[in-house]
């Protein structure tokens, strides 16, 4: 909110815009004509194609396996502006994905009755009106814009700093792969090798069984996603209110169905003593200052230290299930609701690219802020941030 010319209040962005230097606005409803994003602040001369964006959208799209929603969407990305001859122009980049497979009739019951633990009721409380079909903006379909923008952010991070952002499912319900995946070496190919997106094959099979079990009962379940950032430049983040872990927490907790965030040692770290938890410094064979352990999760004092950033995100069970539940109507009557529609029995397999996208958006935003503030004048001493400032492809 900002003060208007005559002392009134003017609404700015209204919760659909994220970032400062690298700004992303998402738009569209689940059963509207389309969804997408506008990216502002993207540097010119960055090579980017629709195919690169499409790769990430394909990982997110519905209907990709029996353990996701059966809604069939191609989710084809169209770059409408800001790119010419395969490189960015420095002007806003707009990406549109058109909706094709809406079945709005499946939501007739939800027009009058609220789904328990869904945003139906709270959207009514706030706006006095809502897009009933598909859940409108509360649908995970909104994340298409985030994932498209995240693909661009990933390309910027890789180009400028060699940074890689990878996530995987580490838990579905009570089935976990904790201790079985090496966060420093797992690959995208290993994550994408199975429908649950867990890089440990045996755990993945058990997770799929767990999802099938609840799916066959008309139920749903939750889980956790781990995200690892490799090659993050030192120095990203800021003191006090814009600490990097605080920015990551806000970004990730803005995703649908999220209920918990951890970084590094997380809540387990609160059980340790200082000597047990501290990450001791040493000089590696390349003369670089490193830490022998990484309980800090790659961030100290709100600023990245160059070690891998490791975060975890907990997702609740999908609220729309094929079982009768007690609820109330918009006019205050207690009723039973058997919800219809097409929904994920477990959101975490498709949440993996969403988590990567939000982490990439935070890092891209802070990368641009860091360069603007801290890399303009030469450094006489002190650690380098290892950001390349001369590698963007020139416009031909």
Image (cartoon, grey):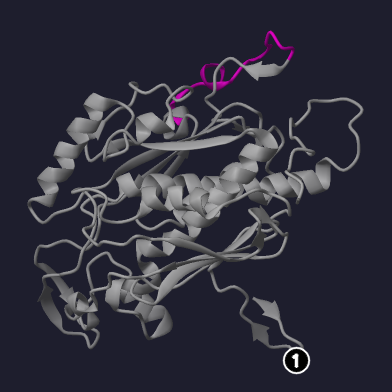
- Residue 70 locus on image (x, y percent): 21, 58
- Residue 357 locus on image (x, y percent): 50, 49
- Residue 377 locus on image (x, y percent): 91, 40
- Residue 160 locus on image (x, y percent): 69, 39
From this viewpoint, is residue 10 visible? Answer: yes
- 157 above or below 3? above
From this viewpoint, is residue 247 visible? Answer: no
> Start and end of the magenta stretch?
270-287
> Which quadrant of the rendered structure holds the N terminus?
bottom right
At x 65%, y 83%, the residue is 10
Residue under label 1: 6
| Viewer-proximal residue among 393 and 259 | 393
What SS does tag 1 mark?
loop
Looking at the image, residue 283 sits to the left or right of residue 35; the answer is: right
Residue 172 highlighted magenta (yes or no): no
Quarter of the figure with residue 102 = bottom left
Badge 1: residue crowd in 10 Å (few <14, some 14–19, many ≥20):
few
| Viewer-proximal residue among 161 and 240 | 161
Residue projecting furthest to the top: 285
At x 92%, y 28%, the residue is 380
Q: How many marks?
A: 1
At x 28%, y 69%, the residue is 101
Looking at the image, residue 220 sits to the left or right of residue 120; the answer is: left
Looking at the image, residue 373 sits to the left or right of residue 23; the answer is: right
Residue projecting furthest to the bottom: 6
At x 66%, y 84%, the residue is 9
| Viewer-proximal residue among 333 and 205 | 205
- 144 above or below 29? above
């Amino acid at each position: 909110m900002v003060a208007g010319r005559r002392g009134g209040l003017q609404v700015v962005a209204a919760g659909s815009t994220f970032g400062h230097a690298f700004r992303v606005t998402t738009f569209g409803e689940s059963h509207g004509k389309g969804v997408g994003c506008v990216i502002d602040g993207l540097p010119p001369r960055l090579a980017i194609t629709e195919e690169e964006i499409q790769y990430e959208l394909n990982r997110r799209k519905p209907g990709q396996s029996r353990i996701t929603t059966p809604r069939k969407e191609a989710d084809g990305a169209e770059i409408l502006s800001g790119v010419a001859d395969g490189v960015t122009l420095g002007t806003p980049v707009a990406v549109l994905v058109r909706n094709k497979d809406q079945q709005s009739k499946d939501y007739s019951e939800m027009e009058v009755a609220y789904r328990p633990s869904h945003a139906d009721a709270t959207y009514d409380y706030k706006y006095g009106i809502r897009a009933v079909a598909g859940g409108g903006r509360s649908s995970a379909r909104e994340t298409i814009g985030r994932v498209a923008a995240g693909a661009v952010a990933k390309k910027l991070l890789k180009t400028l700093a060699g940074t890689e952002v990878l996530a995987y499912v580490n838990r579905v319900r009570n089935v976990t792969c904790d201790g079985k995946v090496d966060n420093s070496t797992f690959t995208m190919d290993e994550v994408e090798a199975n429908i649950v997106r867990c890089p440990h094959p045996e755990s993945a099979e058990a997770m799929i069984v767990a999802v099938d079990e609840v799916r066959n009962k008309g139920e749903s379940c939750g889980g956790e996603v781990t995200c690892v950032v490799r090659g993050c430049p030192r120095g990203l983040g800021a003191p006090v209110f814009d600490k990097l872990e605080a920015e990551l927490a806000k970004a990730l907790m803005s995703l649908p169905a999220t209920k918990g965030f951890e970084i590094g040692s997380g809540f387990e770290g609160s059980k340790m003593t200082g000597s047990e938890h501290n990450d001791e410094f040493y000089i590696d064979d390349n003369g670089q200052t490193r830490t022998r352990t990484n309980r800090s999760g790659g961030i100290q004092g709100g600023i990245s230290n160059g070690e891998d950033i490791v975060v975890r995100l907990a997702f609740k069970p999908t609220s729309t299930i094929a079982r009768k539940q007690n609820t109330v109507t918009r006019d205050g009557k207690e009723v039973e609701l058997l919800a219809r529609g097409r929904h994920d029995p477990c959101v975490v397999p498709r949440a993996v690219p969403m988590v990567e996208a939000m982490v990439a958006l935070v890092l891209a935003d802070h990368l641009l802020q860091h360069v603007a503030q801290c890399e303009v004048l030469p450094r006489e001493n002190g650690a380098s941030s290892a950001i390349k400032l001369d590698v963007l492809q020139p416009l031909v």
